[in-house]
Amino acid sequence: MATLTDAKRLVVKIGSALLVDRATGALRDDWLRALALDVQWLKGQGTQVVLVSSGSIALGRGVLGLPATDLPLEQSQAAAAVGQIRLARAYEDVMALHGITTAQVLMTLEDSRDRRRYLNSRATLETLLALDALPIVNENDTVATDEIRFGDNDRLAAQIAATIGADQLVLLSDVDGFYSANPSDDPSAIRYNVIDEITAKIEAQAGDAGSGLSKGGMKTKLMAAKTATAAGCAMAICHGFDPRPLQRLHNGAPATWFSATLDPQTARKRWIAAMKPRGTLTLDAGATLALENGNSLLPAGITAVAGDFKRGDPVAIADPSGHVLGLGLARYTAEETRTIQGHHSARIETLLGYPGRAALVHRDDMAL
Ligand code: GLU
C-alpha cells in the first residue's frame, strides 16, 4: 500500500466543501491555514506538491448573492470569476506565511486533449516545480463551456497527475473512501482499504452521490482512479474536513487507496510507444549515441525529416541506417523541423523568426 511520504510528486485535490462553509459561503480560514502546514511538512520532506483546488464557484456565489443550488452555466461562470480571484489570494496569503510561492494555473479540457497544449502545460508545471513554486490548479470555469468542461476537479486532478507523472494523487473529500454501497442508505456497506484493480463489480458499486457544493460523486472519483492508475499514479480517497488531513492520512486515517501497477515513467513510455507515428526523423551517428545515453533529441543531429506532423504529434526516430529506435512527441511541426534540422539550437530563433524549445523531442517524451 502506498504511503504519503513515499511520493516524489504528489497531487492533492481539495473539494469545495472543505474550503467553503456551506451555510455561510465563507472561506474556512482555519482549515486552509492548517492545510498550509501539511504542504510545508510535505515539501520539507522533499515531496513536490501540486494542489488542484475547487471552491471558486462556491466562494463567488455568496459574494454575488446567488443561491446555493445548481446554477445556470452563465451564473456559475460569473461566480467562478469572482470566486477564483479570492481563492487565489487566500492561498497566496496563507502559503506566504511559510515562505511558499504559489502559482495559479487555470486549465480547460482542451489543454489535456490537444497534445501540443498538453506538452505546453506539462512544461509549465515542470518548470514551476523545478523553481519550487506551489502550483494551484483549477478549471478555467469562466471560459469553459458545458460541452468542453471537466466539470469536476476529481477528473481534472487525475489528468494533471497523469500529465506531470505524479506518483500519488489524494482526493480530499467529504467521504473517507470508496464503499461497497452508499453507506448513508446501506448499513452493511464496507469501505475498501485498497483496490488493486477496478473491476466491473467495483464500477457497479460506485453510486452517483455528490454533495451539495461539489460535482464529483463516486463515479467521477472512479474515473479519476482509472486515469491516475493507468498513468502509474496511486490514488487515495480520504476525508478532508478536519484540519491537517494529509498528516492524518499519513498517520493511518481511514482511506481507500487505488494501487498503480506501473511507475509513471514506464506508463508514459508505454502510452507513447502505442501511438501511430505521423512522420520519421533520421539521426546522425552522434545524435543516435546521445539518445542511447538518455539525452533529448536536438535539431542539430537530424539528417532527414519524412511525413507531415504537428507539434505534439508522435514521430518515429531512426538511426543513420534507417533502423527505427523508437517514438517520441515532436515539439516542432514537420515544416519547422525541416528548417532547423542540422542546426544548433541557438539558431532556432533566427531560422524560424520566433523562439522555441531547444530540444526537438524531449527525453521524457520518448519511448526507445
Ligand atoms: N471548478 C469548480 C470550482 O472551483 C469546482 C468543480 C468541482 O466541484 O469539482 O468551483
Image: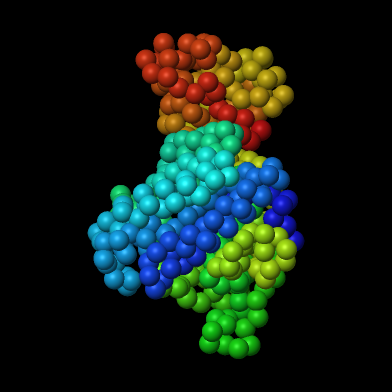
Question: How far from the left and from the top, in percent, is residue 261?
Answer: 70, 55
Structure colour scheme: rainbow
| Viewport quadrant of the C terminus | top right
Residue drawn at x 27%, y 67% is 66
Residue drawn at x 37%, y 15% is 353
Residue 15 in sight in this render: no
Query: In the shown orientation, is residue 77 left or right of residue 342?
Result: left
Quarter-of-image position of residue 214: bottom left
Question: How far from the left and from the top, in percent, is residue 183?
Answer: 57, 82
Question: How far from the left and from the top, in percent, is residue 286?
Answer: 66, 14
Residue drawn at x 53%, y 70% is 174
Determine whether 272 is above or below 16 in the image. Answer: above
Determine whether 286 is above or below 73 in the image. Answer: above
Question: How far from the left and from the top, in percent, is residue 149?
Answer: 37, 56
Residue drawn at x 44%, y 44% is 104
Quarter-of-image position of residue 1: bottom right
Residue 364 in sight in this render: yes
Query: In the shown orientation, is residue 57 left or right of residue 334?
Result: left
Name the residue nearer the viewer: 305 or 351.
351
